[in-house]
């Protein structure tokens, strides 16, 4: 790898990808909405790892801004060798209690942006005969939970079919399916995860290293953490109606105000 473009680079899993990739000597193009945070990350990466960092401030739920990022991904003169579609957020866990516009914006980031950027990346990488795409999905995609979970199910399935279409081209596609990971994700959505057992939590730095090992091994679906490998395996083996019944009972609680 030489240049990686990471969306959602200013926090959590995306930030961990940037640090790990920079440590391995890759230049970076970093994408998120807030320019000040992008500049902080850029300063940190340049100072600590002496790599080149380009900033692209963009809201991926907005078509025109997404197109700008897609143009950068497709730029033949400044090739992107690794695309990490990581940006994401969750609106909450109830469609009926939530705001439809928020749900649509979430799908735009979790699905539309992944589709558009993967399309741009896969075409230009295939022309060059090499490259990698990582789409950050989630283990919740293996069980029906919410529109967020449905979007992640799409992301995993989409990446599997993308990997199939790219086979033999020198380009790989991997869906990264983490479980609960300590980032800003739950706080931003006001989700109370305080009662979750410690054993369920993953560390972003560790899962990113595991994912890059899986990319090197050409794995199409990367599930970090033994606890989630087991859970994902069970979800795929037991009858789907039982998975649906169990996931309906699992709930996230918002803090009382
Ligand atoms: N944390 C978990 O437990 C967990 C588990 C499974 C999967 N995931 C997935 O992992 C990915 C990263 O999440 P995280 O946990 O690292 O969350 P995070 O700490 O909240 O980071 C989210 C990143 O996405 C950016 N972002 C959010 N909305 C955006 C938009 N509309 N346009 C462009 N950038 C946007 C944010 O920056 P700005 O706010 O500046 O835009 C930030 O850099 C997501 O796809 C999430 O669904 C997370």
Image (cartoon, rainbow, N blue to C red):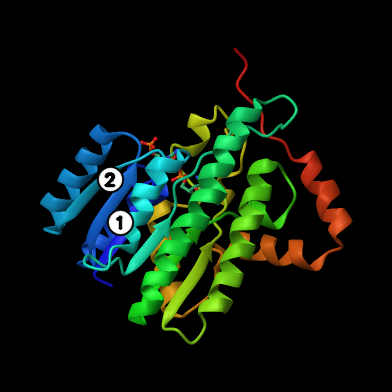
Are discs 1 and 2 less than 8 Å apart at CB? Answer: yes
Where does the image place residue 41, in percent across and percent down from the top left? 23, 44
**Residue at image mark 2:** 56
Q: Is residue 239 above or below residue 44?
A: below
In-front residue for pair 214/38: 38
Quarter of the image that includes the C terminus: top right
Label disc, if present, on residue 72 of the rendered structure? 1
Q: Residue at x 31, y 34 (%)?
A: 34
Quarter location, residue 107: top right
Q: Is residue 44 above or below residue 17?
A: above
Where does the image place residue 119, in percent across and percent down from the top left? 47, 63
Q: Which of the two discs, 1 and 2, labels the residue nearer the N terminus?
A: 2
Task: Determine if the C-beta at disc 1 is less than 8 A from ligand 1.
Answer: no
The number of numbered badges drawn on the structure is 2
Q: Is residue 108 above or below residue 210?
A: above
Q: Can you see residue 60?
A: no
Q: Residue at x 22, y 65 (%)?
A: 78
Label disc, if present, on residue 44 of the rendered structure? none
């Amino acid at each position: 790898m030489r240049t990686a473009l990471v969306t959602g680079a200013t926090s959590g899993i995306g930030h961990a990808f940037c640090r790990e990739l920079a440590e391995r000597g890759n230049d970076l193009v970093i994408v998120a909405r807030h320019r000040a945070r992008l500049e902080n990350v850029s300063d940190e990466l340049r100072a600590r790892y002496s790599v080149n960092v380009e900033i692209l401030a963009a809201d991926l739920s907005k078509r025109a801004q997404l197109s700008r990022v897609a143009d950068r991904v497709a730029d033949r003169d400044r090739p992107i060798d690794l695309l990490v579609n990581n940006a994401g957020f969750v609106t909450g866990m109830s469609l009926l209690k939530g705001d439809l516009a928020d749900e649509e914006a979430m799908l735009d980031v979790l699905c539309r942006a992944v589709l558009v950027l993967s399309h741009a990346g896969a075409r230009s990488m295939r022309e060059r005969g090499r490259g990698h795409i990582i789409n950050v999905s989630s283990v919740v995609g293996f069980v029906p939970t919410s529109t967020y979970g449905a979007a992640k199910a799409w992301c995993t399935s989409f990446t599997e079919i993308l990997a199939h279409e790219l086979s033999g081209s020198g380009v790989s596609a991997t869906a990264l399916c983490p479980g609960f990971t300590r980032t800003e994700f739950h706080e931003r959505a006001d989700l109370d995860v305080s009662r979750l057992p410690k054993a369920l939590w993953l560390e972003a730095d560790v899962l990113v290293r595991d994912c890059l090992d899986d990319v090197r091994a050409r794995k199409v679906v990367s599930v970090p953490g033994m606890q989630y490998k087991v859970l994902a395996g069970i979800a795929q083996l037991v009858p789907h109606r039982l998975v649906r019944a169990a996931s309906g009972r699992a709930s996230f609680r918002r803090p009382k105000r």
